[in-house]
Image (cartoon, rainbow, N blue to C red):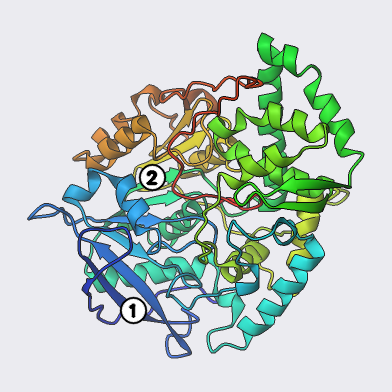
Amino acid sequence: APPVAPAPAPALSLQPCRLPGLATAVRCGTLARPLDPADPHGTQITLQVAVLPALARQPRPDPLLFLVGGPGQSAVELAATLQALVGPLGQQRDLVLVDQRGTGRSAPLRCPALEQPATAPLSQQLAGTEAQARALAACRQDLERLPGGRLTAYGTAQAAADLEAVRQALGVAQWNVIGVSYGTRLALELLRQQPQTVRRLVLDGVAPAGMGLPDAAEQDAQAALDGWLAACAADPACHQAHPRLGARWQAWLARLPQTFTLAHPLTGTLERVRLDAEQVAGLLRAPLYQPALAAGLPRAMEAAMAGRPDGLLGLAASLQGTDGGPGLYHGLHYAVVCQEDMAPLPTGARPGPLRRQYETLCRGWPTGAPPAPLPPSPAPVMLWAGGDDPVTPPRHALRVAQALGPKARLEVMTHGGHGLLSHPCVADRVRRFIQAPDEAAALRVSGALGAPPAGGSVPLTAVAWGSCSLGLPRPLPLTDGARPRQDTPPPTQPPAAAPR
């Protein structure tokens, strides 16, 4: 395929606008972009751009660029959340938000049949894979009939080329890039394409190209669950209340599918719902994203084995919104995942349940080539990983840090989940990293790492484990009726099978 390069960027006219949840004025505009960046005179789409101005009278010339997750979330729709996350950094620097092509108002790839409010009947929310695949196939056919419906044009490489065009149109020499979950993949691709335009790079919950989402997510979620089961076994009260929890759970899963009478966690409506092992696994993955929710799993698992899976539904529902908006633009999600995360399995490897689910859902969607290796980074990079993250655990961040070389700094929050920027310790480190006057000062923010070896790789012994520590919530049975404390949620609330 021809190299993806940004076309000369036309002028971007920003006008005052208002965004939900923001009390201050914002500047918004659109930028025309070729559907195929390698064909600047072909079909055009428009990108939605929003700039949240710095509070200072003379802001710094290097703004913040925040890249959100999914894939399939709209940065502009999350503007209020993202402004809160950057906090004091927004006083001195503009915050630039770009709706990635396929989301928001940037040639959105919506699948209305797959958009459900959290109050939708459980029978709809827990529809089987084949029913989802039929709805997704119909959506794909509708999208392909749109003027900008060439789905191969909605990958991470094209989105990164769009960002470079926005930078040129804004007249910015360099910017500080913050990526969360899938946004880390887009940030790394931007670094690959335009390394000299990135002043500092912050990656929270690293989901690199080539991770193979369905296969990795299954392995990583199981590792996170095993960690919680081990914590329960090591806690005298939890072990006494839930002896041999893991073994009994596996035996119960083997007896599925079964039909249960379930109370909707938000409406209280009773429904008869048939659950199989794959559906239960999806419900189990969701609370693992936040340790405060995962602490309630032992009791919820016991209740499920006693015929009452309502507790699992309640924990999973805690990660969902209730407004029924698009939330995730499913067309973009599958355009990216099916192209970039479904490489053939090694000879003799057997697909797991999540891989089989995505193989079914990706039928008819474009496929892509494996990614190129990451070159060393000329800019300082701060990588964050939660020690108990079920979808982007430290192993992915470590691989990226090793590729990025001497200017990469990986920090692991002990017992942290998915999405760490909302934690005060992490936010303070990120603020000092970006505000540091020079590269040497930025690299000293993660002083526990020491100097990487001359070869440029970052060995495991150089990772700052626990420099920002999150105390492990006790996995107790909670027989006193207490609810587990919820930390401030991460900026992206993931569905069970996406890295958001």
- Is residue 304 depicted above or below 203 in this figure? above
Q: Is residue 327 left or right of residue 311?
A: left
- The answer to which image quadrant residue 166 occupies is bottom left
Q: Residue at x 27, y 39 (%)?
A: 431
> Which is nearer the eye, 324 or 75?
324
Residue kind at label 2, given as amino acid type: Val
Image mark for residue 215 = none
- The answer to which image quadrant residue 114 occupies is bottom right
* Disc 2 to disc 1, C-alpha distance: 26 Å
- Is residue 135 depicted above or below 185 in this figure? below
Q: Are marks 2 and 1 in contact (CB under 8 Å)?
A: no
Quarter in which the N terminus is drawn: bottom right
| Residue underneath mark 2 | 202
Q: Residue at x 75, y 75 (%)?
A: 364
Q: Is residue 415 left or right of residue 382?
A: right
Q: Is residue 341 left or right of residue 98?
A: right
> Which is nearer the eye, 206 or 124?
124
> Which is nearer the eye, 366 or 120?
120
Q: Is residue 247 left or right of residue 397?
A: right
Residue kind at label 1, given as amino acid type: Leu
**Residue 388, horizontal then vertical, whole percent:** 58, 31
| Residue underneath mark 1 | 31
- For label 2, the crowd category at 10 Å Cα-Cα, with few meaning under 14, some 14 to 19 and many 20 or more, is many
**Residue 14, horizontal then vertical, whole percent:** 22, 75
- Is residue 356 depicted above or below 455 in this figure? below
Question: Helix, strand, or loop for circle 2?
Answer: strand
**Is residue 457 among what the camera can see?**
no
Q: Residue at x 47, y 51 (%)?
A: 184
**Is residue 191 among what the camera can see?**
yes
